[in-house]
Image: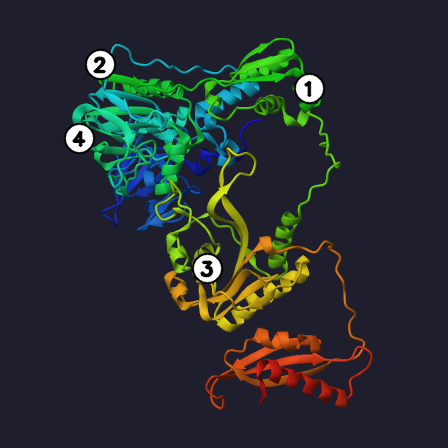
Amino acid sequence: RTVEVEDVVRSADKFHDIVVGEIKEVNAHPNADALKVCVVDVGDGELHQIVCGGSNLTAGHKVCVSKPGAEVVWHGEGEPVKIKETKLRGVPSYGMICGATEVFLADVFPPKDEREIVDFTELGIECEAGQCVAEVAGLDDVILEVDNKSLSNRPDLWGHYGIARELAAIYKIPLKELSTELPEGLPEYPVTIEEPDRCNRFTATKIDNVYVKESPAWMKTLITNAGMRPINALVDITNFVLLAVGAPQHAYDSTHVEGDEIVVRLANDGEKLLLLDEKDLDLTHDHLVICDAKKPLNLAGIKGGKDDSVLDTTNSVILECAVFTAPGIRRTTAYFNEKTDSALRYEKGIDTQRADLGVAMALSLFKEIYPECVFSAFTDNYPVKTENAVIDITQEFLDRRLGEVLPQAEIEDILTRLGYEVNFDGETYHCVVPTWRSTGDVSIHDDILGDIARLIGYEYFKKQPLTVSFEHSVNQVSTDMARKLREYLAFRCGMNEIFTYPWIDEKYINAAGIDTAESIRLATPPAPELGILRSSLIPGMLESIEKNSRYFDEFAIFEAAQVFEKGEYSPSSPDEVLPVHRNMLTGAFAGKDAKELFFKAKGVIEGMAGYCHFTPFTFKQKNKPSWADEKVWINIVEDGRIAGSIGLLSVQVLTSAGIKMISAAAFEIDTAVIEPYPSRTNEFRHLPQYPLVEQDLSLLVDESVRWADINEAIKYMVKDLRFVEEYRGKQIPAGKKSIMLSLKIGNDDSTMTSKQIEKKMNGIIKVLEKKCGAQLR
């Protein structure tokens, strides 16, 4: 009825047989100065002897003990090992007194050194001998793992409070309301928003009398259970609020903010920003940044900068809780490949009202963890407010789509529980969508229909087949042909289909020798080097060959996709203008034997027509593609027009694309020129009733003579004709080459006699002499 739970993890399971032990005695080890022999009560009614090398063993203190059968990570490294009773330097030892790194507690109770054991007494934690450590540490929670696909379009569920709101609606239980109270009567902290369409709201609270310290154990436990690592209280508060209500926040060291003002603006081209992780960014004018009077402080909504980070000396912070719009965040994260927890939430679309929850919760936590802190300034710059979507949906629509009539009261109850405001006028429900669902999640009446159905339960509705009209058939010749071509290449030719982005790295465009002057450039590319829309599929194929060649010595790949050219195309209305595009098909065979690769590629093209039911291609050398070897290429011709090309990738192309240790042959076809036969019925030829005669011919021809010329000259005289090999070298005159071919001849009505064979072969040789200047070797 809401998100899908992928897994249920019980945190306490990994703490099996790990309990609280009370040290009764600490004695010296007779054979090792670095070890102690302890007498420990683990709550089972007996006292046990445990040998330990901990640096802080104290009689009367309660510690963490792993009994025999427990699994620990030895010294915090490697795979878990099972504890058993043993002897250490000749002294029997029942179990193990553990440090935090050994029993998954380092995030909650970080040790001062590697020999320090977990001392609950020193930590001020009340517990009893024998009590499970998971319970003592607050790690006995049940974690529900939810995959992104379940809530990708539900920005309200990217926080625990959103999930709680859903569960309250589903199970009809009260939802605990959170405070949205903001500070009042404080001086304003100067905040300027220059781009309100990119930053809808920005709150800044100056908080003095704070310092870097560890968060309380309960907070560290909750953050750890949610998959984050506790850092310090100042940072943990912002992460806690992010997880709790889905409101990203950032804490600046206020002493680093020059001019005591914050400006939200677009970066200048070439401006620099050093991030927290030491990554140095070259900014462009499309990137939104948070600045002080002189410099950028952080990449808005994504990651903080090194210059504004909280340090050990920090005593005053400015707490940011802002709302940035999704499109700009998506572009910037893609550009810099910076996917952060904050960015993931902004990308989904956050309502501006969520900042109220975030600020109120954060300030409450600051007061709890830093009772002495002072809120000295507050600003709420709020240029754009998320408006409630309003959608009307009729009773008749609901009855028809759900397949049954639902009572008005039930519909109103469901929608009200989900946060809608509903008014029914007898025919239509006028629904005011809550702001947390008004950022694109609920925008049409089908969304409301889905909410009603899922809360009732899809399983309670009868399944009914959709009504399909067959009055008008749809001509899908081009679609059918595209599917047939892909089917042929994948199933008949054993090639693997690939998918590449329409924007291409200029490295591979240049490697293919393609002029970019007529290419379409993107105004806001996803990355600096990905600014051109492809005008050919060959550059993308080069990139795929380069990447796959790292792992495979031989492979065959293909792609069917669109390429783009300058010009305007309006598919549905004059207002909708797209670039001109064409459907292309490209493929490549990669391996060691260049000649074999070329003929494999050519064979694939030759067999394509028969499988896909269209007129076979012819092959001629008319216009060499920029990416092909000077000597090994040929054009694919359809009805006199060049439909594509086949060729070996030149050495220069391979080198420029970074392709090493292999050769590759590629083809590219404009599929628009392929016209399928009007009928898909195959015509079959009878197998020959009489045996065919196979003959080999070795011919001496000029270098300029192509295999295609020989094939064209005699194909009507033979039943089958195949290329065998080509040879240059000793005994072959300069400017000549030797070609060996294999052919089959035969009669349709009788077995060929020796005289008939001789006559036929003489005729073939004479045709070759006349048309190709061939000499029999």
Quick one: label 1, few (<14), some, or many (20+) residues within 10 Å?
few
Give the answer, above or below, for where 525 lies relative to 622.
above
Q: Which residue is drawn at 67% across and 13% down?
A: 407
Q: Quarter of the image containing the C terminus?
A: bottom right
Q: Which of marks 4 and 1 is in front?
A: 1
Which residue in the structure is indicated by mark 4?
Answer: 313
Q: Which of 368 and 81 is in front in this view?
A: 368
Task: Report how far apart the C-alphas of labels 2 and 4 lie in the structure.
Answer: 25 Å
Task: Report how far apart the C-alphas of labels 1 and 3 lie in the structure.
Answer: 55 Å
Could you say whether the residue bearing mark 3 is in a helix, strand or loop? helix
Count of numbered marks: 4
The disc, 4 or 1, on the residue closer to the chain's N-terminal end is 4
Q: Which amino acid does label 4 sit on?
A: Thr
The disc, 1 or 3, on the residue closer to the chain's N-terminal end is 1
Q: Which numbered dot is residue 399? A: 1
The answer to whether the residue labelled 3 contacts the one labelled 4, judged by CB atoms less than 8 Å apart, is no
Task: Report how far apart the C-alphas of labels 3 and 4 lie in the structure.
Answer: 52 Å
Q: Nearer the viewer, mark 3 or mark 2?
A: 3
Q: What residue type is labelled 1?
A: Asp
Q: Which of 86 and 472 is in front in this view?
A: 472
Q: Which amino acid does label 2 sit on?
A: Pro
Residue 330 percent coordinates (x, y): 40, 36
* Residue 718 visible here: no
As drawn, the residue found furthest toward the top would be 425
Give the answer, above or below, for where 183 lies relative to 22.
above
Q: Which numbered dot is residue 187? A: 2
Could you say whether the residue bearing mark 1 is in a helix, strand or loop? helix
Task: Report how far apart the C-alphas of labels 1 and 2 lie in the structure.
Answer: 56 Å
